[in-house]
Image (cartoon, helix red, strand yellow):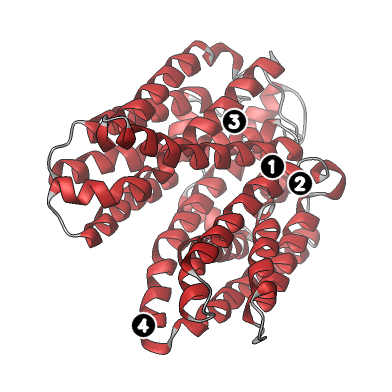
């Protein structure tokens, strides 16, 4: 039962990564077919991001009412319908319309599934699962390439991924009886019996029931603002590096576009491979050490990128180091949430964390684009360094804050 559900969750993470690169890889063809300027891609991605933020904030109430399994299944079904809708869109406004349910489904499933894994599975699985998400995100450009070269067009790529998501929805619906049978990995509260657990407001094993934690109350929990700042900073630096690293190498360092593209992709591969490797040590090292070590490694990579040396070898190697350092931060922040804040509050806090993550990932890369247009591309490593410093300082302050307080579930009971 435990292993069967875990296998389904692994497949779900691969499937969740599949749609994430479709817009970027297909837009050069899509915008011509739809008759819109190339810059209109930002409108689609902003609509998707807006939906993910809204559904992330609403995920706790949905999960407490329906359970993590049903929320995951319905959300994946919503993304499947949206992707198939993308495949049938013959105009830009229809694409924008379908972007809304896609974003709503993506945000809800991200929050619900991450919280369920954080509650029920070891740290190694959180790292490996996010590595599998990277596998899915890496596969989707190849699906788009296959669809374009085989005559299916960009709509064929969306149709393939949409059907895949629809099949996964059926599998998730069939697996619903399993979601409430896996014991949480963290203490349930002051006592083990169900009556005490229900009285403390903690949800059942599948996340259903219990008293919701309002957003205002969640933000008042000691340490929550700090973890939100750290998560915002990490996602801001990750997405900024993914989007602008290649341009920086070409414009500021004089690297050839081919070499720059290859090493920029190594940053992404470093994240995927680094999460796989982190899984082997995560249980022994612990979430806090992974977060601390990750930010320090990213900082070292940023310094290597910034050093004004006559050779570009160190800057290129710095991108790889930064990718490997980035790898464990996201999974470790998520996995440590129930330990830091308690099982009753974890779904609400992870939902807010997802909203902070999407905000950083959505707004900071365009901000750097505006900054670089004004000040120059040389500011790229400096921009990343600011977020490395914010993430490291906030995560260390969180550790000290949590260490000086009662156990998380005792705090929830007070």
Of the numbered discs 1 and 2, the one sitting upstream in the chain is 1
* Distance of label 3 from label 2 (alpha carbons): 30 Å
Q: Quadrant of residue 226?
A: bottom right
Is 40 in front, or is 225? 40
Residue located 37% across and 42% down the image: 22
Return the residue at label 2.
278
Return the residue at label 4.
373
What element does badge 1 sit on?
helix
Residue located 54% across and 80% down the image: 253
Asked whether the residues under the numbered discs 2 and 4 touch, taking CB atoms below 8 Å apart as contact, a structural biologist would say no
* Distance of label 1 from label 2 (alpha carbons): 6 Å
What element does badge 3 sit on?
loop
* Distance of label 1 from label 3 (alpha carbons): 24 Å
Of the numbered discs 3 and 2, the one sitting upstream in the chain is 3
Is 128 in front, or is 65? 128
What element does badge 4 sit on?
helix
Q: Residues within 10 Å of mark 1 (few under 14, many from 20)?
A: many
Q: Residues within 10 Å of mark 3 (few under 14, many from 20)?
A: many
Of the numbered discs 2 and 4, the one sitting upstream in the chain is 2
Is 242 in front, or is 125? 242
Q: Is residue 336 visible?
A: no
Return the residue at label 1.
127
* Distance of label 4 from label 3 (alpha carbons): 49 Å
In the rendered image, the residue lying farthest to the right is 284
Q: Residues within 10 Å of mark 4 (few under 14, many from 20)?
A: few
* Distance of label 1 from label 4 (alpha carbons): 36 Å
Q: Quadrant of residue 39?
A: bottom left
Residue 369, given in percent of the width and then of the height, sits at 38, 74
Residue 203 disc label: 3
């Amino acid at each position: 039962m435990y292993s069967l559900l875990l296998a389904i969750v692994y497949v779900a993470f691969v499937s969740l990564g599949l749609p994430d690169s479709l817009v970027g890889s297909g837009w050069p063809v899509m915008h011509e077919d739809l008759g819109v300027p190339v810059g209109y891609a930002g409108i689609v991605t902003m609509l998707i991001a807006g939906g993910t933020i809204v559904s992330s904030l609403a995920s706790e109430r949905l999960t407490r009412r329906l359970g993590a399994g049903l929320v995951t299944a319905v959300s994946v079904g919503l993304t499947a319908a949206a992707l198939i809708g993308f495949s049938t869109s013959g105009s830009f406004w229809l694409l924008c319309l379908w972007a809304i349910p896609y974003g709503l489904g993506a945000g809800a499933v991200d929050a619900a599934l991450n919280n369920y894994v954080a509650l029920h599975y070891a740290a190694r699985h959180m790292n490996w699962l996010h590595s599998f998400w990277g596998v899915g995100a890496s596969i989707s450009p190849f699906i788009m390439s296959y669809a374009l070269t085989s005559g299916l067009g960009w709509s064929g790529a969306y149709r393939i991924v949409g059907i895949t998501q629809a099949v996964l929805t059926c599998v998730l619906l069939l697996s619903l009886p399993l979601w409430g049978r896996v014991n949480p990995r963290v203490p349930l509260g002051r006592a083990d019996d169900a009556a005490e657990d229900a009285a403390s407001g903690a949800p059942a094993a599948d996340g259903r029931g219990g008293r919701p934690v309002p957003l205002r109350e969640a933000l008042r929990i000691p340490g929550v603002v700090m973890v939100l700042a750290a998560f915002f900073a990490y996602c801001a630096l990750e997405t900024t590096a993914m989007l602008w690293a290649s341009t920086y190498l070409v414009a500021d360092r004089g690297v050839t576009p081919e070499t720059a593209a290859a090493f920029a992709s190594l940053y992404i591969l470093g994240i995927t491979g680094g999460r796989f490797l982190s899984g082997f040590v995560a249980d022994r090292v612990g979430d806090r050490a992974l977060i601390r070590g990750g930010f320090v490694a990213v900082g070292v990579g940023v310094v290597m990128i910034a050093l004004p040396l006559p050779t570009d070898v160190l800057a290129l190697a710095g991108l790889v180091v930064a990718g490997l350092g980035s790898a464990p931060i996201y999974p470790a922040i998520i996995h440590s949430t129930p330990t830091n804040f308690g099982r009753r509050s974890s779904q609400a806090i992870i939902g807010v964390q997802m909203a902070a993550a999407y905000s950083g990932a959505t707004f900071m890369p365009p901000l750097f684009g505006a900054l670089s247009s004004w000040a120059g591309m040389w500011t790229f490593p400096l921009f990343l360094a600011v977020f490395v410093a914010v993430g490291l300082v906030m995560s260390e302050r969180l550790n000290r804050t949590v260490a000086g307080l009662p156990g998380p579930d005792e705090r929830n009971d007070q």
